[in-house]
Amino acid sequence: MKLKALIIEDEAPAYRRLHGLLSAHHPQLEVVDVVDTIQAAVTWFGENTAPDVIFSDIQLSDGLSFEIYKQLPPPCPIIFTTAYDAYMLEAFRTNGIDYLLKPIEEEELARSVTKFMGLVRTTNTPPLPDIQRLLEAVQGRGTIYRDRFLVKLGTKLLPIATADVAYFLSSDGTTELHTRNGKRHLIDQPLDEIEAQLDPRSFHRLNRQCIACVECIAMVHQHFNGKLKVELKPNAPVEVMVSRERAKGFKDWLDGVG
């Protein structure tokens, strides 16, 4: 008899990788669905029978996934998946069944599945995470900002540290991540979502098409009508302008005020 697994994940490459690894190496687990927001998860649990295990990203586009379980009790064991480093997650070792760091490796996934299956075999009620303690642990550390992005490179998936990102550009429904060494990669997220995941001390939304790192702003030029023209490094393939309405906030940010 197969056990049912639900994936809560808002990054398409991460979902596809996890689903592929489960299908290829853990046929005892059947992925019944994937949801990508807190509200979608709450709705899903209200309309479906609880799965046997959940693989849940921590930071979703509309907040921390712990918020799901403030609205309803955890219905089953949860294996958390996250791009954040292990130091930030030490509390999860005792409060959650397990966690996986992105990009998820086959061996680490196997360890988590083995742990879960062992709990299933030894007890009819596998332990559930103490969501309140998890939430307090994260909040006690301060706001968590994303520290890497998973991009597709041909048939491969490549993690890129946020510290290596120069800027993000959006055009015609696509988003590009530009690295400090001049490489560009397509990513499956709009700028609005990305902006919410970045440390505002390091990254700023210059306009509707661009988010830039402060260390990669080479020069700012006064332009007509109160606008600002921004030179980025490496050079951006398009002209980057800051509107008159955004100019003061941008200058305050550069000056360490905003």
Image (cartoon, rainbow, N blue to C red):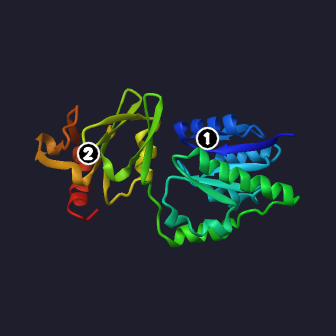
- Out of 111 and 161, give the one closest to the viewer: 111
Q: CA distance from mark 1 to mark 2?
A: 29 Å
Find numbered disc 2 in the image and state the secondary structure of the residue it sits on: loop
Q: Would you call the spot at circle 2 few (<14 residues within 10 Å), some (14-19), or many (20 or more)?
A: some
Find numbered disc 1 in the image and state the secondary structure of the residue it sits on: helix
| Image position, residue 154 (x, y; %) | 43, 28
Image height of 146 relative to 32, above or below: below
Q: Earlier in the sequence, mark 1 or mark 2?
A: 1
User: Which kind of residue does numbered mark 1 sit on?
Assistant: Leu
Question: Where does the C terminus fall, quadrant-wise?
Answer: bottom left
Specify whether residue 228 is in view.
no
Image height of 33 relative to 90, above or below: above
Residue at x 63%, y 59% (from the top left corner): 66
Q: Residue furthest front?
A: 107
Whether residue 169 sits left or right of residue 188 in the image: it is: left
| Image position, residue 109 (x, y; %) | 63, 48
Labels in figure, total:
2
- Out of 18 and 48, give the one closest to the viewer: 18
Which residue is under mark 1? 18
Whether residue 19 sits left or right of residue 1 in the image: it is: left
Which residue is under mark 2? 180
Residue at x 71%, y 44% (from the top left corner): 6
User: Which kind of residue does numbered mark 2 sit on?
Assistant: Arg
Image height of 252 relative to 141, above or below: above
